[in-house]
Amino acid sequence: MRLNVLQQMLEGLYHVEVEYAVEDFVITDPDIARRLDESLTPRENREKLLVSQDGDEVRLALYLDSSILGCLEEDCPLDELHRDNFEDFLLALEGVSHFLYMSWNASRDRGVTLLELELQAEVDKYVLASSLFSRQRKTRSSERVWRCLFDSPVFDQTLDGESRTRYADASHYAGRFCFNLENSYLKQRREAEMVTELRKFYRLSQAGKISHIHSVMA
């Protein structure tokens, strides 16, 4: 599976476009990833967006463990998404989501928070996984995807307190937003209106996203 195809799927969904292709920024060497990681609390992850900023210049690299790419090459989730390739698909999609969201906002001179990145990635995983299952199996599987992603999320035990809170908040808010997508749009077969909602949400800031989630769940 080409990562550029995932990027194109997200660009089409949200009606956005960036001038860069994610595959040109992918690295698989963990030693290079460690050297490029400028985060305050670096961790050994199978997927990691590496960001460096010097003045107005933002440099990006997307680290993906080679096993992820190997799995997706041998067992393409775009042909069939199932138990054995689901985790690797989500990791790859998360990385592409981070890359696209960061690139699109940077091109508009908009800053992005870590919480915002994670929240949007969780929404992207729910929407694309649900869409693939529906298309491949001809049945609506969005409820099962929601339960898998948001019902009892498990977080890396090595996370520090601040990072764990951020991931938990991202999962909480994304879960509430996707719950509304499920009940207000997918169950009602209002997919076109859901796309409008998703495109509006994508363009909101972190504060705007959280405020919007509270409003639709009120």
Image: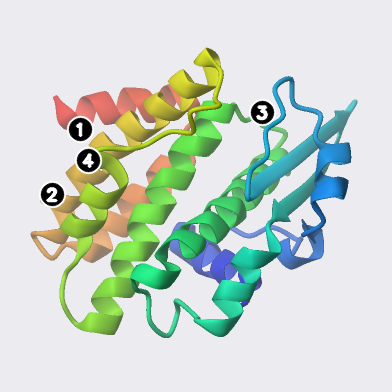
For residue 2, the mark is: none
Distance between mark 1 and mark 3 Cα atoms: 25 Å
- At mark 2, the secondary structure is helix
If you read the primary sequence from the N terminus, does the residue marked by circle 3 or circle 2 appear first? 3
Judge by depth and name the residue closer to the eye, 196 or 96.
Answer: 96
If you read the primary sequence from the N terminus, does the residue marked by circle 4 or circle 3 appear first? 3
Distance between mark 4 and mark 1 Cα atoms: 19 Å
Identify the amino acid type marked 3: Gly
**Quarter of the image where the C terminus is located:** top left
Distance between mark 2 and mark 1 Cα atoms: 10 Å
Residue assigned mark 4: 151
Is residue 127 left or right of 90 when viewed as pictured?
left
- Residue 214 x, y percent position in the rendering: 25, 24
Is residue 120 left or right of 196 when viewed as pictured?
right
Kindly indicate whether the residue at mark 3 contacts the one at mark 4 (C-beta within 8 angstroms).
no
For residue 184, the mark is: 2
Q: Is residue 128 above or below residue 173?
A: below
Q: Residues within 10 Å of mark 3 (few under 14, many from 20)?
A: few
Kindly indicate whether the residue at mark 3 contacts the one at mark 1 (C-beta within 8 angstroms).
no
- Residue 18 x, y percent position in the rendering: 69, 58
Distance between mark 4 and mark 3 Cα atoms: 30 Å
Residue assigned mark 1: 216
- At mark 3, the secondary structure is loop
- Residue 84 x, y percent position in the rendering: 40, 71
Q: Residues within 10 Å of mark 1 (few under 14, many from 20)?
A: few
If you read the primary sequence from the N terminus, does the residue marked by circle 1 or circle 3 appear first? 3
Residue assigned mark 3: 111
- At mark 1, the secondary structure is helix
